[in-house]
Image (cartoon, helix red, strand yellow):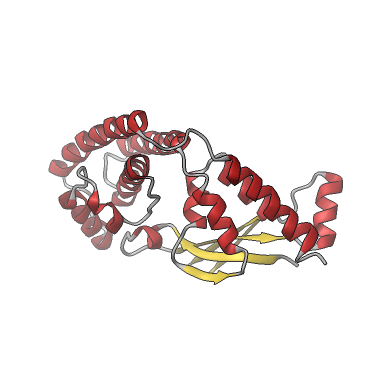
């Protein structure tokens, strides 16, 4: 049986995007002793990722080792999950994971945001910029990246991005309205948004060049990750 470490809300609900079609629930867990030993012995990945649907709830939980590896890459999606303030369940080890996540905030995350936004922009071209949800996800990636690289603050919800000089309330509010009313984006806004994405891409590049963040996840993050893994699998929970 898996032992949960934490369970949080992620995705559209966390970002503040209205009228989500489902609720993204994410978490991390450790395996029971028998399965842990089996996976180690046979180099298998059983229960490394648990994915279940409960009505409109999309639940995904990651085994601790996988979760920590993704944090240390670093992977912004996993940092976002670890630092989500919409907590459904939290064990005493949740704060340890959050501490590691904070120490993984670095300049290298730029490549995640850039790599996330560019393919979605190509998708928008195919969709003729009609899908407000996709457009909002691109905005969120750019805003999150610019804010983090400039200030060191890792935020996920649109309300936190209003402090940015590049934040465009008109575009965000309009896309929120399109999302709620399930209507395509007007032609006049499409041109404006396409140009705005280009500007945000340039700003993200500049923020990366001028950022005072460390280049890679800190050594502290790596050490704490090993200590937590050892503690949960070989000490506290396993005794």
Label count reads: 0
Q: Who's the residue at 34% across and 44% down the image?
A: 151
Q: Nearer the viewer, residue 98 or 62?
A: 98
Residue at left offset 46%, top offset 36%: 214
Query: Relative to 85, is 141 above or below?
Result: above
Asked if residue 93 is positioned above or below residue 99 in the image, the reply reads below
Instruction: Pinpoint residue 167: horizontal percent, then vertical percent.
Output: 21, 47
Residue 230 location (% of width, % of height) = 75, 54
Instruction: Name the image quarter holding the C terminus.
Output: bottom right
Residue 55 appears in view: no
Q: Residue at x 61, y 68 (%)?
A: 92
| Any part of residue 187 in sight | yes
Q: Is residue 42 left or right of residue 142?
A: right
Q: Residue 209: x and y, percent?
A: 35, 28
Q: Is residue 77 above or below residue 196?
A: below
Q: Is residue 43 left or right of residue 228?
A: right
Considering every residue shown, the one lying at the far left of the view is 188
| Quadrant housing the N terminus | bottom right
Residue 3 in which image quadrant: bottom right
The percent position of residue 122, horizontal first and vertical second, equals 35, 33
Direction from residue 130 to residue 104 in the image, left or right: right
């Amino acid at each position: 049986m898996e032992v949960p470490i934490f369970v949080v809300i992620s995705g559209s609900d966390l970002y503040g995007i209205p009228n989500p079609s489902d609720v993204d629930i994410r978490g991390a867990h450790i395996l029971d002793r028998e399965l842990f030993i089996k996976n180690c012995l046979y180099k298998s990945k059983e229960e490394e990722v648990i994915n279940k649907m409960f009505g409109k709830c999309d639940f995904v939980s990651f085994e601790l080792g996988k979760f920590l590896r993704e944090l240390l890459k670093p992977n912004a999606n996993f940092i976002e999950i670890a630092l989500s303030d919409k907590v459904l369940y939290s064990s005493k080890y949740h704060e340890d994971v959050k501490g590691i996540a904070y120490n993984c905030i670095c300049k290298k995350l730029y490549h995640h945001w850039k790599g996330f936004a560019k393919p979605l922009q190509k998708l928008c071209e195919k969709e003729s910029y009609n899908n407000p949800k996709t457009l909002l996800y691109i905005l969120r990636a750019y805003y999150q990246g610019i804010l983090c690289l400039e200030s060191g603050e890792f935020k996920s919800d649109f309300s936190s991005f209003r402090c940015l000089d590049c934040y465009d309330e008109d575009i965000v509010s309009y896309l929120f309205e399109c999302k709620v009313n399930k209507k395509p984006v007007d032609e006049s806004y499409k041109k404006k948004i396409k140009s705005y994405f280009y500007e945000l891409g340039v700003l993200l590049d500049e923020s990366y060049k001028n950022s005072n963040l460390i280049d890679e996840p800190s050594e502290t993050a790596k050490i704490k990750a090993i200590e937590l893994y050892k503690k949960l699998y070989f000490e506290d929970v396993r005794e």
